Amino acid sequence: MNQAAQQDLRDEEIVALCQQGRSEVFEVLVRKYMEKAFRIAFDFTHDTEEAKDLSQEAFLRAFSRIKQFDGRSSFYTWFYRLVVNICLDHTRRKGRVIWERLEKETEGGTETVELADNSSLPDEEAIAGEAKRKADLTLEAMPNKQRTAFLLRNHQGLSIPDIAKVMKTTEGTVRVYLHRAVAALRQSLVEFV
Amino acid sequence: MKEHIDTLRTACKDFEEDLVLYYYGDDSEAERGRVEGHLQSCLSCHEFLDDLRKLLPQMAKPKELPPMFWDNYYNEMVEKLAVHQERHAWWKSLFAPMRAWMLPAFGTAAVAALAVGLVISRGHWHYPFSQTQERIPQEILADTNQLEFFKSMDMLETLSSLEALDGTKVQPGNNHHG
């Protein structure tokens, strides 16, 4: 099978081929999901190298467990769960270290312009940077489940039913997590109003 | 500061959760109609929604990375998969000659060998407790009174040796025990 034909395969077909021993086809899944996997990990870690390592670890884990994938959920839901779990484990291990580093980075103003609108006024950028810093710190301080639900919905664009599958919970619970996360963000940004 | 940045405003408590779901498009048709009806008459909820529209997409803005990064990422990943597969193949080759029937066969053979070993060593392997029991003649063991007598004799011997160690003499008759 040539590369072009491999690219056209659906996830389920790729997984079936991998389960039959055609493991080279797994690279198509890497190509397809590497950006998403990296972005989730980056949302959790705020560090490019760590995000790369964690997302690649998720691919390796998916590769080694591909025979256990039973097709009850879609591949990407199953894979998202692996990425999220790896990121949460990492967050638990590192604890407050991430938060402290984030504070340092944002104090330096390295990534503070993303919340700025089209205006290039320096004071607006500084304010937007401060708001961004606050928002990131609030996200870091949130309970893991709230943050996961928020990141998957807001940053990854997953639907609520899919988030429920990834987090192995109900859609109602995801809605509550999402609302609480947004409410917490509102609270943290109230000083800027 | 207040002039430059618009952030979240207070919304009606009953509608806050619905507004979040409305923003993401995760509500039902009926909920949507209810929220839209409320938004027409409530300025603070309207502003709250505007703030969500302004803030949340900005938060989700991904970090821009050059195409080179993704090429390196992919190549590194392919390499890692190859290494992983190689390692896995090594384990597989170790167990490859072992057929499915071999595992129970080896298990049975091991159990049989263990049983034979136990039978053979039966006459030579004793617990320390049983050894001390065997040193006492059976005639004595049969009579518990005699056994008590011998135990007291043992104690007398022990006392004598203790006295010898201390270098003190104990008067005869003091060694009697009830």
Image: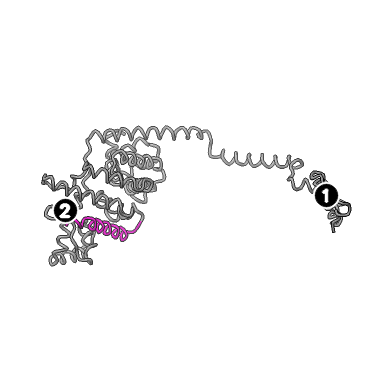
- Image-based side of A37 in relation to B114, left or right: left
Q: Earlier in the sequence, mark 1 or mark 2?
A: 2
Q: CA distance from mark 1 to mark 2?
A: 97 Å
Q: Is B60 one of the magenta-colored residues?
A: no
Report the magenta residues as a range. A169-193
Q: Amino acid at mark 2?
A: Lys
Pointers 1 and 2 in contact (C-beta within 8 Å): no
The disc at residue B54 is 2
Tell me the chain of label 1: B
> Residue A10: horizontal and vertical position, in percent?
30, 43
Within 10 Å of disc 2 (Cα), the crowding (few <14, some 14-19, many 20+) is: some
Q: Between residues B177 and B65, which one lies in front from this camera angle? A: B177
Residue A36 showing in the rendered view? no
**Dot 1 alpha-carbon crowd within 10 angstroms: few under 14, some 14 to 19, many 20 or more:** few
Q: Is residue A189 magenta?
A: yes
Total marks placed: 2
Asked where in the image residue A143 lies, by quadrant, the reply is: bottom left
Residue B86 circle label: none
Q: Nearer the viewer, mark 1 or mark 2?
A: 1
Q: Secondary structure at mark 2?
A: helix
Quarter residue A65 falls in:
top left
As drawn, is A67 to the left or to the right of B157?
left
Above or below, A42 against B20 in this view is above
**At label 1, which amino acid type do we have?**
Asp
The quadrant of the image that shows the C terminus of chain A is bottom left
Q: Which mark is residue B154?
A: 1
Can I make out residue A111 in this image? yes
Front position in the image: A18 or A133: A133
